[in-house]
């Protein structure tokens, strides 16, 4: 049985006071998180160190992005070596906003995957098609090539550390969620693609999250799909009550 992961991607939101209020609320509720669900929070990088100092945090921390270098003259960047040293377990990589606004290519994402693994930070690798690609029936090709280009150079042992997040770009922040069938179909396709490269055991074990307008109302149904192992949640992770409802729904799925 794969565990479920519910990850909150706060993006570039909240002042430090607001961020701490939400982090402390989640810490206080953490004893009621379902045992089969790993809760992950990805605050702005600036707040990771402060949140990490909360005692008995009860959830894992993730960066939203990181450099593909370990150290050096790279002004403004955050290194996976620094993340590891601060007990940050994951980094989101290849989010569609990074691809769109910061021109991250599959090759750049692949080198970030390598940098994270080299430093023992687990990638939460994002893939997903834009609306035009889905309309043209090219969504499977797009996702397959994103997965292949960024991940398929990894060894089995390396790949086993990667979490995949399928995030159709047309569903991110739009309030339009993929239907349960659309999500399940793509997740099963990704798992089959992984099986083709790494075999059944690795494919059965890989955690594939759904992201794109997950909210407290639709999460239970999405997470009940057999190949959907939880969610990467943006907007709804900014409100403690909604995020708690989503976490609890993953426990029942
Ligand atoms: P959303 O964002 O839940 O606000 O659609 C998801 C994401 O971008 O990870």
Image: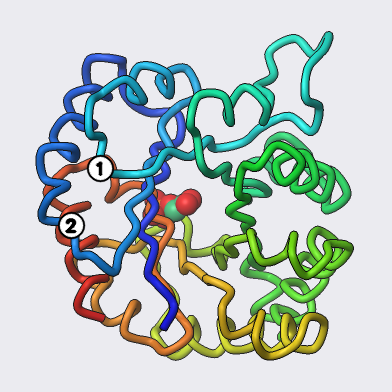
Which of pointers 2 and 1 lies earlier in the amino acid sequence?
2
Depth order, front residue of 248/96? 248
Q: Please identify the quarter of the rendering in which residue 163 is found.
A: bottom right
Is the image coloured rainbow, by chain, by secondary structure, or in one colour? rainbow
185 versus 92 height, above or below: below
Q: Residue at x 23, y 31 (%)?
A: 23
Q: Residue 251 carries which label?
A: none
Q: How far apart are marks 2 and 1 (CA)?
A: 9 Å
Give percent across and percent down for residue 83: 58, 28
Whether residue 173 is visible, yes or no, is no
Considering the image in quadrants, where does the C terminus appear? Answer: bottom left
Q: Is residue 32 left or right of residue 120?
A: left
Residue identifier under label 2: 33
Q: For this view, does 140 lie left or right of residue 74?
A: left
User: Residue 128's spot in the image, x, y percent?
Assistant: 64, 66
Q: Residue 169 at what x, y percent from top left?
A: 57, 60
Give the left or right position of residue 71, taking residue 57 as reference.
right
Residue depicted at 29% across the width and 47% down the height? 237
Q: In this view, does 144 lie to the left or right of 7?
A: right
Q: Where is residue 151 in the image (x, y as percent from the top left)?
A: 79, 62
- Front position in the image: 204 or 77: 204
Q: Helix, strand, or loop for circle 1?
A: loop
Q: Looking at the rendered structure, which numbered label has been put on residue 58?
A: 1
Are there few (<14), some (14-19), or many (20+) residues within 10 Å of tag 1?
A: some
């Amino acid at each position: 049985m794969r565990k479920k992961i519910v990850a909150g991607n706060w993006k570039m939101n909240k002042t430090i006071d607001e961020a701490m209020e939400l982090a402390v609320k989640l810490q206080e509720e953490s004893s009621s998180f379902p045992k089969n669900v790993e809760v992950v929070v990805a605050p702005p990088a600036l707040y990771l160190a402060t949140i990490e100092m909360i005692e008995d945090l009860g959830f894992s921390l993730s960066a939203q992005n990181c450099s593909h270098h370990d150290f050096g003259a790279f002004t403004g960047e955050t290194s996976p070596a620094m993340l590891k040293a601060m007990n940050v377990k994951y980094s989101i990589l290849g989010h569609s906003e990074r691809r769109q606004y910061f021109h991250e290519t599959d090759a750049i994402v692949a080198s970030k995957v390598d940098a994270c693994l080299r430093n023992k930070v687990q990638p939460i690798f994002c893939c997903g098609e834009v609306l035009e690609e889905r309309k043209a029936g090219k969504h499977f090709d797009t996702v397959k090539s994103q997965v292949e280009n960024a991940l398929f150079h990894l060894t089995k042992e390396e790949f086993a550390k990667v979490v995949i997040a399928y995030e159709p770009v047309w569903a991110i922040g739009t309030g339009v969620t993929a239907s349960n069938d659309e999500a399940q179909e793509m997740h099963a396709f990704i798992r089959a693609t992984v099986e083709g490269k790494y075999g059944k055991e690795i494919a059965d074990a890989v955690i594939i999250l759904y992201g794109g307008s997950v909210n407290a109302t639709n999460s239970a149904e999405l997470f009940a799909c057999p190949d959907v192992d939880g969610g990467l949640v943006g907007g709804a992770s900014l409100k403690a009550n909604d995020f708690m409802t989503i976490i609890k729904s993953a426990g029942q799925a």
